[in-house]
Amino acid sequence: MKKKTIGQYIVQDVWFLEAKKLGYRARSAFKLLEIQEQFDIIKPGMSVLDVASAPGSFLQVISKIIGPEGLAVGVDLQKIKSLGRPNVKLLQGDIFDAPKIAAFCESIGVKQFDLVTSDIAPNTTGMKGVDQYRSIELNIEILKFADPWLKMGGNIVLKVFVGEDIQELITPIKQRYTTLKRIKPRACRERSFEEYFVCLGKK
Ligand SMILES: C[S@@+](CC[C@H](N)C(=O)[O-])C[C@H]1O[C@@H](n2cnc3c(N)ncnc32)[C@H](O)[C@@H]1O
């Protein structure tokens, strides 16, 4: 991938510049667009819960595809600036604050979602093994979180730092979903061990 450099420092890459050009809030938009291109998981009229949404580029992609009949709910610890789209509802809070999530969903009349997208990652330590293991633990918590919120047959997308213990995440995924597809979108940093797990067909 081409990178813009000043001296030895990489300042921006093509994804960052492309996101800016197209009005996306983050390069992550291209990751979800590639996942969508490959698996067609977002459809018009769907209800989607986007976990860890700030600054909101996944939501920009989702909101456009689900259209006026759909609903996207974005939750993040940080405040997400309004997208100015009526099909998007935003909540500032911790995804693991179950009463807060339940109260919010009740207030907007949502009982369950067709799709959950999660871009959550642990705070990285720089120690590869530690970061990978924390990512597994976090994603197991997201799977449990999603159990009551996802409709039967629904799908979930997880961001995963893949390492040697990955089977510890694959096992609970396979208990819950009929199919697991893995993808490393082009917009993921080349040297990162980040992948997205697309879990299809909640049992
Ligand atoms: C990589 S960013 C998400 C980018 C987003 N998908 C987008 O496309 O703009 C990760 C986000 O996870 C959020 N986050 C981390 N832990 C969280 C938690 N427990 N509950 C809600 N959000 C969390 C962070 O605040 C951060 O904004």
Image: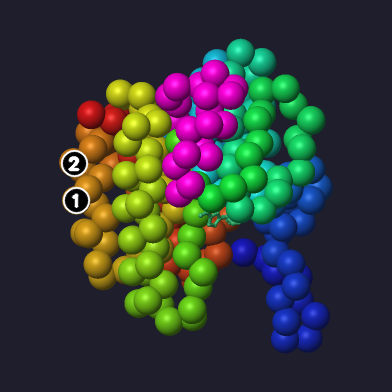
When asked about the image quadrant of residue 174, the answer is top left
| Within-10-Å neighbours for mark 1: few <14, some 14–19, many 20+ | few
Quadrant into which the N terminus falls: bottom right
Residue visible at 45% across and 36% down in the picture = 116
Please give left or right for residue 13 compared with residue 129 in the image.
right
Residue visible at 33% across and 61% down in the picture = 137
The verdict on label 1 being within 8 Å of ligand 1 is: no
Q: Which residue is mark 1?
A: 171
Q: Give percent across and percent down for residue 192.
A: 48, 68
Please give left or right for residue 94 compared with residue 197 in the image.
right
**Mark linked to residue 80:** none
Identify which residue, 82 or 178, lies in the foreground.
82
Q: Give percent across and percent down for residue 70.
A: 58, 19
Please give left or right for residue 20 compared with residue 44 in the image.
right
Q: Which residue is mark 2?
A: 175
When asked about the image quadrant of residue 104, the answer is top right
Q: Secondary structure at mark 2?
A: helix
Label 1 close to label 2 by CB (< 8 Å): yes
Q: Can residue 76 be found in the magenta stretch?
A: no
Residue type beneath disc 2? Gln
Q: Which contiguous range is marked in magenta?
A: 96-115
Q: Relative to residue 7, is residue 198 depicted above or below?
A: above
Q: Give percent across and percent down for residue 121.
A: 48, 60
Q: Is residue 133 visible?
A: yes
| Within-10-Å neighbours for mark 2: few <14, some 14–19, many 20+ | few
